[in-house]
Amino acid sequence: MSSGLKLILAVMSATVMLTAGLWLACGVLGGTARGKRVAKALNIPRPAVIAHRGASHLAPESTVPAYLMARELGADYLEIDLQRTKDGTLVVVHDDDLSRTTNVAEVFPGREKDTIDTFTFAELAQLDAGSWFNRTFPDRARGSFKGLRILRMDEVIALAESGTRRPGLYIETKAASRFPGIEEQLVGALRQRGWIEDSEGPPSGRVIFQSFEPNSLVRLKSLAPRVPRLLLLDELMVAREGLDSLMKIASDVGSGVGTWGVRWAFSPYWSLTAAPKRYLTTWPWHTGQAHEAGLFVHPWTINERWEMWMVTLSGADGFFTDRADVALAVVGKPGRDEPQTLWNRIGY
């Protein structure tokens, strides 16, 4: 190949790369501007750091120290997975059963795989929801985690209200179809505590509802129209419905969309089905598509620093994370104190 031809090809390649880079930059910057407008209209902080089950990298998920640490770190939201006991108590538990995060096999032999709605709250109160963390993560273990309890929703609300920092609440109705009327119970409890109001007015981002079930969001929309709502997405939904269709559904039932991060897409340990995992829903063009539809974008669950940068540069309006301590630094909102100082402050 002649030197002249090489020069021409080099110039052409550079031109293509520059054009692509400018196109991507314009898309990201434009998407960021649209995202800011969407978040501002809904009164949602941007970028929002959502403490997934609390500061669940540092403490047992969905327990008092996890939520206290997230609050003291300065997370914008405490994320809650809401279920209901056999006797009607709203409790904060992620999994369908208790085998992973409690000693249910010891306390109630044979009930390890029973769902939350088969237990009374008095039964749940007998379980140790902290010791598993010490066994699983010995480098982060603390003696004070032993014997931690499963929390009621009203206890998490009290934690959010009790400090000088006042995070919002980001509440998921888990398996809502299994708990008829849970939306009414949730909204009633929040109204009673003054977290949502009946009066007309602009949207309030103090509380955000989230669900994988569109019907639950429809019900929440009718009960509390001022509260933003986010449709969570998983690989099965995208494989079955298609992303374009889900964006429309999200627009119809809510105000936002919860995509998943790259780490989940490529993890061999996470798969709902045998559906292809090639659906990466956090690229700038996907985020831009959501913003064009008037939706905010909060991907889940983003724990690696590189991935936090990636979703932020892709125009996401915040993200769910177990690592609120790292995330706050990445988005430019670092806490004032080191974790050990905070542990001393909150008594753990």
Image (cartoon, rainbow, N blue to C red):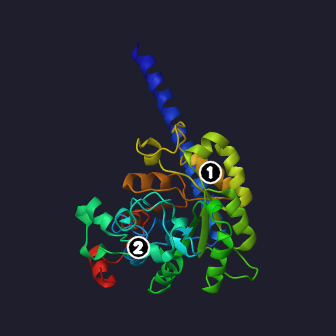
Please, what is the three-letter code of the amino acid marked with disc 2? Thr
Q: Earlier in the sequence, mark 2 or mark 1?
A: 2
* Quarter that holds the C terminus: bottom left
Query: Which residue type does callout 1 highlight?
Result: Gly
Query: Which residue occupies 45% across, 72% down?
Result: 75
Where is residue 32? Give x, y as percent: 57, 57
Q: Is residue 28 left or right of residue 65?
A: right
Q: Which mark is residue 222?
A: none
**Of 334 and 20, the residue lying toward us:** 334
Is residue 126 toward the left or the right of residue 40 in the image? left
Callout 2: few (<14), some (14-19), or many (20+) C-alpha neighbours within 10 Å? Answer: many
Mark whose residue sits in front, 2 or 1: 2
- The residue positioned 64% from the left and 86% from the top of the image is 192
Q: Is residue 150 above or below residue 100?
A: below
Residue 218 found in image quarter? bottom right
Left or right of 188, for residue 145: left
Q: Nearer the viewer, residue 244 or 274?
A: 274
Residue where numbered disc 2 is placed:
63
Residue at the location (48% across, 61% down)?
Answer: 320
**Does residue 46 appear in the picture of this structure?**
no
Left or right of 122? Residue 35 is right
Q: Residues within 10 Å of mark 1 (few under 14, many from 20)?
A: many
SS for dot 2? loop
Mark 2 in CB contact with mark 1 (< 8 angstroms): no
Residue 121 appears in the picture as rendered: yes
Instruction: Determine the residue positioned at 71% across, 53% down.
Output: 249
User: Vertical placement of 215 versus 63: above or below?
Assistant: above
In this rendered view, identify the residue nearer to me: 126 or 314: 126
Residue 27 spot, x, y in % from top left: 59, 48
Q: Secondary structure at mark 1?
A: helix
Tell me the residue that label 1 is attached to.
Answer: 288
Quarter placement of the N terminus:
top left
